[in-house]
Image (tube, rainbow, N blue to C red):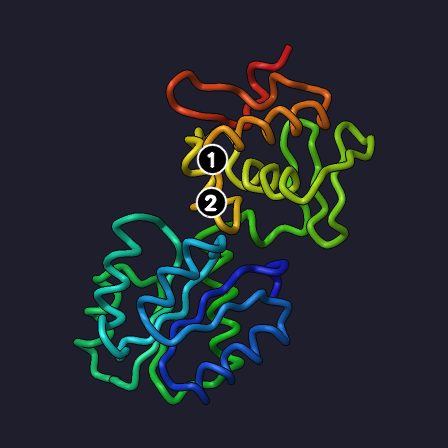
């Protein structure tokens, strides 16, 4: 897979299938969280940034189509639906619900990995890059290094995650709550003002406070256009 270390959430109630999918994805340099139902899926999405969801239709409790609708109402996280149903109407329902792709069981794990990579490249092109680059800031995702105008920048783990999120979405304004939910693994235990603290640290590390723009009553954005 050409995407460097994407975070993939697998929601599949069959243990053998879930284990097989997770194994193949991990063998292709993916970070995988594997769960069996909608409740565990919700907890996983609250705890981690998710780049792609692989979602089975037939689940205990709330089914995959309903879960897909809920995800799509709140975010654009890409979704690949899995199902034992092969009829055209079922595939159409899955796509109409908001899924980005649809794979019928039994399927080849290699095909699933290939489709996952294709969806990620199509939906979030920034993830396909080995480096992220904006406003003189360069992040090497493979080497886990950051440079500003050619000079090495030392960042803590939280500042690194925060900067990566901004680099993947330059110019976009994020509220403190959105940043908490995306960057912090357990955001329910973190206060909003913690975001401000790490923004200040990131600005100091970059030695350019204006590149992370404060948008009054809205949040923060990585924006080099206003830097003198």
Q: Is residue 102 above or below residue 97?
A: below
Q: Residue at x 72, y 46 (%)?
A: 140
Q: Is residue 194 above or below residue 223?
A: below
As helix, strand or loop, the secondary structure at mark 1 comes to loop
Q: Which x, y percent locates residue 133?
A: 65, 37
Question: Which of the image's four quarters has the N terminus?
Answer: bottom right
As helix, strand or loop, the secondary structure at mark 2 comes to helix
Residue in the foreground of this view, choosing between 55 and 159: 159
Q: Residue at x 30, y 48 (%)?
A: 74
Q: Is residue 181 left or right of residue 167?
A: left
Q: CA distance from mark 1 to mark 2?
A: 7 Å
Q: Is residue 88 left or right of residue 131?
A: left
- Identify the mark at residue 191; answer none if there is no mark: 1
Query: What residue sits right under mark 2 in the picture?
Result: 189
Q: Is residue 65 left or right of residue 170?
A: left
Instruction: Count residues near mark 1 (Cα–Cα under 10 Å), then give few for <14, some for 14-19, many for 20+.
Output: few
Residue in the foreground of this view, choosing between 193 and 89: 193
Q: Is residue 123 above or below residue 137?
A: below
Give the farthest residue toward the top: 228
Q: Which x, y percent locates residue 136?
A: 70, 28
Q: Are marks 1 and 2 in contact (CB under 8 Å)?
A: no
Residue in the foreground of this view, choosing between 100 and 217: 217
Instruction: Count residues near mark 2 (Cα–Cα under 10 Å), then give few for <14, some for 14-19, many for 20+.
Output: few
Instruction: Determine the image quadrant of residue 219.
Output: top left
Q: Residue at x 46, y 32 (%)?
A: 192
Question: Which of the image's four quarters has the C terminus?
Answer: top right
Q: Which x, y percent locates residue 58?
A: 26, 79
Instruction: Determine the image quadrant of residue 201.
Output: top right
């Amino acid at each position: 897979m050409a995407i460097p270390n994407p975070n993939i959430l697998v929601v599949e109630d069959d243990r053998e299938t879930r284990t097989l999918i997770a194994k193949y994805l991990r063998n292709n340099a993916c970070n995988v969280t594997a769960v069996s139902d909608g409740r565990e899926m919700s907890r996983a999405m609250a705890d981690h940034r998710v780049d792609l969801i692989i979602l089975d239709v037939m689940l205990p409790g709330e089914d995959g189509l309903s879960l897909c609708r809920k995800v799509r109402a709140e975010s654009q996280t890409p979704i690949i639906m899995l199902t034992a149903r092969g009829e055209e109407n079922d595939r159409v329902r899955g796509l109409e619900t908001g899924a980005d792709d649809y794979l019928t069981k039994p399927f080849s794990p290699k095909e699933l990995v290939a489709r996952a990579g294709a969806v990620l490249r199509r939906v979030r092109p920034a993830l396909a890059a080995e480096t992220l680059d904006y406003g003189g800031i360069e992040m090497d995702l493979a080497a886990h290094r950051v440079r500003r105008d050619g000079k090495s920048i030392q960042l803590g783990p939280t500042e690194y995650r925060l900067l990566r999120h901004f680099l993947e979405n330059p110019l976009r304004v994020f509220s403190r709550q959105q940043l908490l939910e995306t960057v912090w693994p357990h955001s329910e235990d973190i206060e909003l003002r913690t975001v401000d603290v790490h923004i200040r640290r990131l600005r100091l590390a970059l030695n350019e406070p204006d590149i992370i723009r404060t948008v009054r009553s809205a949040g923060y954005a990585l924006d080099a256009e206003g830097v003198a």
